[in-house]
Image (cartoon, rainbow, N blue to C red):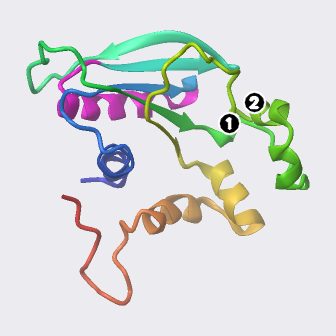
Amino acid sequence: MNLKTRYMEIILHVVMNIQEGESLSINTNPGHYDFAQELAELAAETTLQPVNIVVITEGKPGDVISINPTLHELLSTPPIRAILLRLDDTEDREWNFSADPNDIIKQPALLQKTGNLAPPQLDVQIAPWSIVPVPGLIWAHRLLGPRANRIYTTNLPKSLCFLKKTRNRPGKSMQHS
């Protein structure tokens, strides 16, 4: 299993804990559509329900693509609950790190501009949701500063997800149940 597939498995089975019969909707920007599609294909095989990908462009929902399981039959029963996942893309946003986080939190317009706050929708039931990053070079630079480079881009996600063998326990890596 390659690193990207392992990361997707962690998103689905550890972060989201998706189960058979649940409905998953993935929000993504066009730049991460391929990642979202692979993730949706994996998820559909677990949920046995269609997984929707909502393509978000400049903060506005666009196309909705439905992915069905291909290895297993689709359940004939309605979903038992809905789950939402947003693939966070910090690659296409400008961030001002000189701003005090306490000031940003007090300004909903800034939170909405960075994609971390949506307009209130009080008439809509809220589903369980999560936001996960799709690692990239700009993401690594924002996280690590000027010392980040392509090596960090590929090695950091392994370390963050405990996918890389540890020095203290050679040959041991994270076991996924």
Asked whether disc 2 touches disc 1, contact meaning CB atoms under 8 Å apart, the reply is yes
Task: Say what amino acid the circle numbered 2 marks.
Answer: Gln
| Picture layout, residue 56 above or below residue 12 | above
- What are the residue bounds of the magenta stretch? 31-50
Q: Residues within 10 Å of mark 2 (few under 14, many from 20)?
A: few
Expressed as whole percent of the image width and height from the top left, the position of residue 134 reads 52, 44
Lateral position of residue 146 relative to residue 88, left or right: right
Q: Quadrant of residue 176?
A: bottom left
Q: Measure the C-alpha gap from mark 2 to mark 1.
A: 6 Å
In this orientation, which residue lies closer to the viewer: 135 or 126? 126
Secondary structure category for the residue under label 2:
helix
Q: In the picture provided, is 175 more to the left or to the right than 87? A: left
The answer to which of 171 and 67 lies nearer the viewer is 67
> Does the magenta segment cover residue 110?
no
Q: Residues within 10 Å of mark 1 (few under 14, many from 20)?
A: few
Query: Which residue bears the numbered disc 1?
Result: 116
Q: Is residue 53 left or right of residue 175?
A: right
> Outermost residue, top direction?
63
The residue at 59%/59% (across/down) is 150
Q: Secondary structure at mark 1?
A: loop
Task: Find disc 2 in the rendering and name its residue.
Answer: 112
Percent position (x, y) of residue 89? 61, 38
Residue 56 in percent (x, y) is at 59, 20
- Predominant SS along the magenta part: helix
Q: Residue at x 90, y 52 (%)?
A: 99
- Residue 107's place in the image compared with 29, above or below, is below
Amino acid type at circle 1 is: Asn
Task: Name the residue rendered at 56%, 29% in the picture.
Answer: 31
Q: Is residue 38 left or right of residue 139?
A: left
Q: Which mark is residue 49?
A: none
